[in-house]
Amino acid sequence: MALSIPSEQIPPGMKAVHVGSPFLATAMEELSSFGSKKVFVLANNSSRKFLEGDDDNFVNILQAKGMLAAPLCTSIGMGGGEEGLLQAANEAYAADADVVVTVGGGAVQDAGKLIRLWISTKGSNTATDATVQGIQAASNRDPMPTLAPQIAIPNSFAMAEATIVAGLTTTSKIKSGAAHKSMMPTVIIYDPALSAGLPDWVRFGTALRGVEHAVGAMTHPKSNEDIRTRALAGLSIINENLKKLVSNPECPTTQSNIYVGGFIAIRALNTGCYPALGHLIQNQYSARFGVHQGSCSGILCGRIMDYHFDKSKEHQQRVSVALGDDTGNTPAARLVQDLVAMLPAVSNAHAQVGVTDEMLKEFTQWMFENNLPRYNSLSPKDFGSAEDIYGMMTKPLDEL
């Protein structure tokens, strides 16, 4: 049975979440409701085939109606690289876009939020080209002007479209970004047809991120019972349907249900618990080594849980139950890693993604020198040294 997003889960600033709806008809209806005249469409390359080519595809329809602000933009790469982001922001700005439609994964969804910030500076901005610093400055305005609407059409389960935060990776390979409540996308449309043919590392890796979000919400020092109840509800849905997805990766109902579970989990995390320890460390690992965040979770989620188990045991036992152990006695870190082992093309070892021990030692020293106070504010258990972080990152999986 296909599930839907409960109305109470839809956050402030968001008009609607359509799950399992055909994206073309739904997007055109929403654009009509906005009175949109100049639509800027941003997509990843894998989504291009769904958007242009035939006369009845989205971009062609917009062009025929005189609504397309600029040619389809596909400059956003994995992790939201700075160069591609700034190119897209400049194109939307020059086109006087009045709505942004984002089709694809988390990097594209986050880029849409940042582009909305940049185009909102028109009329008050003397800069000729977008910069990361200019976009971040735009996020700090008070009062914040009304941003152009964003219709987010994800093709996977990363859930960036359900948050007010937007990440990017600088040319120095540092994770950066901006956040403001006004950056929440206006409408989400998840159509499982857009997930057709996704590589396994995207499909299963982004679905695993939902587990990460739920674990983060459960064990965050600022969490509460309401947040944890919602996180567990999302986690149970993800766990049940992710296992089904392994045997039938293209099932529309299963994919829609994973989307619902992932949405509930990310909304729990973002209710006072963002970022969680694992979320932050994995974002940094991804930016440093160019690893997809699904494999970052596959490599690090269980190890991070194991590190602070003695301080978060009660909450981790509830995670174990949600992952199928009714007794709660099997360590949640082990159950997470057992789930990872089931997922095609999702890594669970540093060596599988080309990260050597020497690279890890250098990285964990950087983590300690630059992030220790922040890590300790997010972790149930403090880190006292770079060796603590290194030991966590390299814990043998058979010892979890």
Image (cartoon, rainbow, N blue to C red):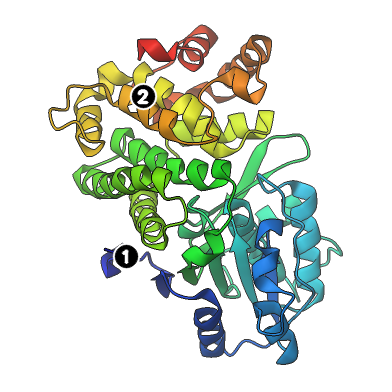
Secondary structure of the residue carrying numbered label 1 = loop
Residue at x-position 62% and y-position 15%? 360
Q: Which mark, residue 47?
A: none
> Where in the figure is residue 129, as x and y percent of width and height?
84, 61
> Where in the figure is residue 234, as x and y percent of width and height?
30, 49
Which quadrant of the view contains residue 382? Answer: top left
Q: Would residue 162 appear left or right of 69 to someone viewing this image?
A: left
- Disc 2 marks which amino acid? Met
Which quadrant of the view contains residue 149? Answer: bottom right
From mark 1 to mark 2, how far is it between C-alphas? 28 Å
Q: Nearer the viewer, residue 378 or 105?
A: 105
Residue at x-position 35% and y-position 49%? 265
From what the image shows, is residue 97 above or below residue 12?
A: below
* Residue on which disc 2 sits: 305
Secondary structure of the residue carrying numbered label 2 = helix
* Residue on which disc 1 sits: 5
Q: Nearer the viewer, residue 367 or 207?
A: 207
